[in-house]
Amino acid sequence: MSNKLESQLAKLTEQIEAEHAKFKGAVTDAIVSVLTQYGLTIDDLLSQPKPKRKYTKRAATEAAAKPKKRTREAPFKGPQPPKYREPKSGVTWSGFGRAPAWITEAKDREKFLINGAAS
């Protein structure tokens, strides 16, 4: 059985190589026709300068080294000091992020302010 598979593999390999040869011939013919149409040679193609990169590795490291501007409300990341407290349970909220249910239901948030917290 393995001899049968090996012979099938050899036939398929030959077919693949034949298709590649046809494809290479067609591509070569197309390239030659374009070169002759525009009067170019292989040396003309090889002597073309490479296009410059707009964004180099050095520019990437310089951009990473610059401090980023803060666009958030908070001047810094991390936990904020509590600004509001629920009197019943003592649960606090900093005023940033999603508001808890106990304060969204309230009409006046000022009654939940912790002493010394600015509004």
Image (tube, grey):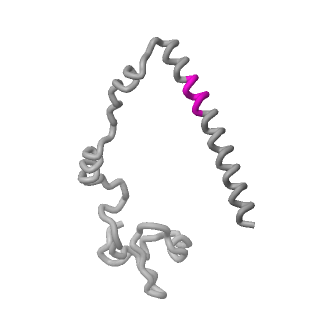
Q: Position of residue 91 (x, y in %)?
A: 44, 83
Nearest to the observer: residue 30 or residue 18? 18
The residue at the far front in this view is 3
Residue drawn 34% across and 62% down? 74
Position of 92 with respect to 16 (left or right) is left
Residue drawn 57% across and 23% down? 30
The C terminus, quarter of image: bottom left
Q: Is residue 73 above or below residue 105?
A: above
Q: Is residue 57 magenta?
A: no
Q: Position of residue 87 (x, y in %)?
A: 45, 84
Q: State how many labels appear.
A: 0
Residue drawn 41% across and 67% down? 96
Position of 114 with respect to 26 (left or right) is left
Position of 8 with respect to 107 (left or right) is right
The N terminus, quarter of image: bottom right
Position of 52 with respect to 95 (left or right) is left
Nearest to the observer: residue 98 or residue 2? 2
Q: Position of residue 112 (x, y in %)?
A: 43, 76
Provide the residue span drawn in magenta.
24-30
Nearest to the observer: residue 50 or residue 28? 28
Q: Quadrant of residue 55?
A: top left
Q: Position of residue 84 (x, y in %)?
A: 40, 75
Q: Is residue 48 above or below residue 114?
A: above
